Structure formats: structure tokens, C-alpha cells
Image (cartoon, coloured by chain):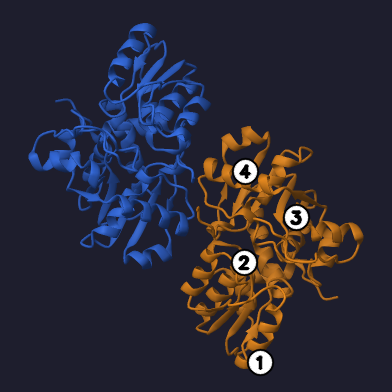
Chain colours: A orange, B blue
Amino acid sequence: METIRLQDIQEAALRLKPHVHRTPVLSSETLNLLCGRKLFFKAEHLQKTGSFKVRGAMNAALQLQAPRGLLTRSSGNHAQGVAFAARTLGLPCTVVMYEDASEVKKQAVRSYGATVVDAGVTHLNADQKVQELMDQTGFTFIHAYENLQVMAGQGTQALELIGQMEAPDAVLVAVGGGGMISGIATVLKSLWPDTQVIGVEPELGNDAQQSLRAGRRVSLAAPPETLADAVRPMSPGVLTFPVMQRLVDDILTVQEETILQAQHLMMRHLKQVVEPTAALPLAAVLEHFHLPERLALFVCGGNWLPE
Amino acid sequence: METIRLQDIQEAALRLKPHVHRTPVLSSETLNLLCGRKLFFKAEHLQKTGSFKVRGAMNAALQLQAPRGLLTRSSGNHAQGVAFAARTLGLPCTVVMYEDASEVKKQAVRSYGATVVDAGVTHLNADQKVQELMDQTGFTFIHAYENLQVMAGQGTQALELIGQMEAPDAVLVAVGGGGMISGIATVLKSLWPDTQVIGVEPELGNDAQQSLRAGRRVSLAAPPETLADAVRPMSPGVLTFPVMQRLVDDILTVQEETILQAQHLMMRHLKQVVEPTAALPLAAVLEHFHLPERLALFVCGGNWLPE
């Protein structure tokens, strides 16, 4: 099985440098007191497009040979990343999104000049829709996580973090398809070998936890009905799962109401607008008392508005 | 009339250095495109206590000789500043707040260990309540803006800004009692003499605009019913108004719906939680097309939550 190495991620970081922000690491004394921990938030909601996803999408797009256009399917943040990459490269872009995806995210995708195809799209027919569009347009499809260049791009946020703080006891990472955590784990298990890499899923969508326990990719029957709309893939990826098996120390789950509470605390004490999925790591801190003291939390995105 | 000089603010900055954050300057390419301007946001909502007010409160508190405790009245952010200063100095603190003041702000004041007196308190009886409490406790009263040390403290955010960017064409500052703008104008008219200093008020509470036009302090009949709850003083201060007359170039007003729209844009594109008052400067950019290109906007506070 082909996989990613630290060197792929280091090369991705050089490739991405002109195109993405070096995001800050935030903290709040009040939040530390409330949680009894030292928390460091890697603020990827302040990344271009409001999410780390632009790293992977851009890393893949920059390596294409004369593409006619870009095509993807996504719950939203990867869509924005691909749309942004297409605009940067002067390419047309079409994105297949579920009909019930976040309206904020759909609008953002359109704002980068991409076409959103969402009428009647569900998890049952999305792949078929993508295939039809590929045949019609000849655009290149960039998958949100079943793509080694995407996985490598996502890992660059961990490379940055290493230059921004002393090694924490553990890092907490939201898990959807596994692109983010496999990139991050590849970096950290090389450069911070004593740091635990812990994934976080909604209890309603614990496919990665089930898969790691079973030793094989377990699939949910349908996309989970969680507030965390960026982690709705029904199973870990073919490319990401072996990396998770090798490098991830544990997967924790959290309840929906804890996700809301964590999002609320991040607004109140960090003054940051984050989407529910980006609150998964803090939700894990609130629910799981065995976690060690110094924790780095990856804040995956901020594409959300109240009401 | 006694007033503040640049040197008072430079001394305040040294005094405050161990106690306050140097806040960042934020920007968003999308917001710049939308507004057709280059906007630089001085992020005082990321200051300790979630507002610049801690600067003035702390500067005053640090210069007291053996106080028995601290007392103030405030719509909320100054209250948090005084409560934080009291906790830092190990002093008891009592705060008189209007009964209908923001619950988020009342809770924050209590979280610093201060006592909130709010039962039945309105603008009609707040001063009397303060006098009673002063007589009972012997605590020292720190006014939110009728205090030269408070005004000097507020000016320190402008000193910081000078080290963080090239001089903009204009700065935009929310105006309540005038403590913030008088401190800021005192710094900027010395060090960035070509930069306009422009105040912003809700149209519903344009006492500073009326006062500058009339050449005397005009008072509203009651606290304005504006979303911008941090600018409800009914007239400019006795100490602040002469500074505003001398140094402020203009005062603009904005409508309530523009304040909401600006707050929304700051959440959406800067990913920052700001209170409505902190959106006044951006609201002015949205409503007043004659403003020049490079603008610095002071973001006064982030003590707000959705719902």
C-alpha cells in the first residue's frame, strides 16, 4: 500500500508556502482554569477559506499536469479548498455537495467562482453525480481524503505547530475520513515521538473508533446526523486507515451536547467563531478526564454562523 | 482644564505592560474586497477581560494609594476591567450595573470575584446607588471615562498600533463617553499627524456628534436603545469633550441594522466573536462611502454570545 512519509509533507509545506497562512496558536487562561489543563489551539479556522482543507486541496492541485478543471464532492470545507485552488490556478471548478449541506459553506464555494451541484444530491447518488460530471467535463477529481497529496497537505499544519510550541503530552484531532489525522500523525510520530495522537469523533459517527477496534474498515449505514457536519464520512478511507492503525494512539467519542458546549466555550473565552466540528477536540477534554495536562487542539474550521 | 498628554500615555504603557496583552492586528482579504478598502482591525476583543477597558481601569487602580476596595458603575466592560484590576491587586470590588445590562458581562464581572449590585438599578438611580455604596464601604470609585488615568490607559492601544502598521489614512473608533477616542486621538495626532481620527456612534445615540456640532456637551434624554450596549452614556464627558473638540476630525453615525450586518461580517470573514459596539467602525465603512482607502478599526470588545 502506498502511503505518505514525512518528506512528502515537508515538500508540501514548501509548495504551499506562497498560498496558505501560517496560522497562530491561541490560548485562554480562563479556559485553562475551567478545564484544569494547558490548552493550545492551532487556529486553522483562520486559514484561507476558513479551514485547513485548503492545504490538501492546494497541494494536490499544484501537482496536476494541465488539468481542464477541478471537480470534487464535499460537505463544504474541502469544496472551498478545491474552489480556492481552482481560482488560484485559473481553472473552472464544479463541486457536488449534499442538498442539506451548510448554506454558509455553499455560498463560500460559489464566492470563489465554482459551480455548486446540489439539487437532489444525497450520499446515495453523490458518487454517480460525480462520475457523470467527470464524463461530461473532463475535469480532474480531487477526493477529500483518498488522495496521498491531500493527506500530505493536511500534515503541514502539524509541521507548523512544531515550530510554535514545546511538545505537548497529546494532540487532539477531529476524525472524518482520516485525511487530517493521518497527515498530522505522520509528522508528529517522527518529530514529537512522545506525544500521543488522539482522534475525536461524535458518538453518533464513531466509524473510526469501531474500525480501529475491529482491525478493519467498518462502515456506518448512513452519514451520521451529527452537528459536526465536517466529519460525516461513513468510514475511514482506504489510504488513511492503515496510517491510523499504525500511528494513532486512541479515538475518543463525544456527545452532541458536549460539542455545543465546547463551541460555546470557544466563542466565549477565545472569542473565536468555530464550526461544531472544530469543537470536537475541546469536547473531548470536557468529557474525558484521563487526558494528560498539556494538550494541543487542532481547530479545523470556522465556517459557521449563529441562527 | 486638566487633560492628558502623550507622555501620560507612554508612562501608562510601561505601567500596564505586565498586566495586559499586546493584541494583534487582523485583516481579511475577502472583507477588503467586499468593502473596497484596506482594513486593519486592532483586536482588543482579544485583550484580557475581552475588552480594551482593562487598560484604563488598571492604569487608574495601579496609581491608588492604599485603597480599601474598588467601586464602579458600568454597562459591563469597564466593570470587568475594574474587577480584574481589583483581583490583581487583592482588593474587594463592587460594581453597580443596570438591571438590563448584558448577562454575559454580569457573569464575567462575578467571575473575577466582584459583587454586582443591579437589582432595580436604572440610569435614574445608579449614581445615588454608587454614592450610598461609597459611603458604606469607603471603596475608591473609578469612573469609566471621567478620569484622566483611565483616559491615558485607553490611549495605550493606539501606541501599540503605531508599532504594528504603517500610518493609515484614518482610524475609526466607537464613541460612548469618549474615554477611548480621547486617549487614542492624543497619541495619534502627535505620532501620525496625517491620519484622521473619526468617531462612530449609533444614530440612536449621537450625543457626541450633536455636541461637537453645537460646540457644547449635549445630553440625550435617556440612554439610547441601541444594540451597541457599550456606548450608552447620554453625553460626552467633562474631561473627554475638550479633547474630542481639539483632536477628533469627525463623528459618523450608523443605523442599527448596519451594526448587525457589520458584526455578522466580522464573524463570517474574520471568524471573530465581537460585540455589537465593536462592529461600529465597520458599520461606518459600510454606510459612508467617502472614507479613504487605508483604515484602522478599533475592535473594542468581544463580550457577547449568540442567542
Look at mark 3 in the image and give the residue it sits on: A204
- Say whether disc 3 or disc 1 marks the residue closer to the N-terminus: 1
Residue A135, numbered circle? 1
Local packing at callout 3 (Cα closer than 10 Å; few below 14, some 14-19, many 20+) is some
Chain letter of the residue beneath label 4 in the structure image: A
Cα–Cα gap, marks 4 and 3 = 16 Å
In front here: B122 or B188?
A: B122
Distance from disc 2 to disc 3, alpha carbons, whole Å, reads: 23 Å
Q: Chain of mark 2?
A: A
Q: CA distance from mark 3 to mark 1?
A: 35 Å
Q: Residue at x 50, y 17 (%)?
A: B90
**Quadrant hosting residue A34:** top right
Q: What residue is disc 4 on? A: A261
Q: Please identify, in this view, whether the residue under mark 4 or under mark 2 is nearer the observer.
A: 4
Residue located 77% across and 53% down the image = A197
Q: Amino acid under label 3?
A: Leu
Q: Amino acid at mark 2?
A: Lys
Q: Label 1, secondary structure: give it.
A: helix
Number of on-image labels: 4
Residues under labels 4 and 2: Cα distance?
24 Å
Are the residues flagged by discs 2 and 3 in contact, CB closer than 8 Å?
Answer: no
**Does label 2 lie on the same chain as label 4?**
yes
Q: Earlier in the sequence, mark 2 or mark 3?
A: 2
Q: Is residue A126 above or below residue A264?
A: below
Among the two numbered marks 4 and 1 on one chain, the one whose residue lies closer to the N terminus: 1
In the rendered structure, which amino acid carries the disc numbered 1?
Asp
Amino acid type assigned to the residue bearing label 4 in the image: Gln
Where residue B187 appears, as percent x and y from the top left, is 26, 41
| Residue at numbered disc 2 | A53
Chain assignment, label 1? A
Classify mark 4: helix, strand or loop: helix
Say whether residue B294 is left or right of residue A261. Answer: left
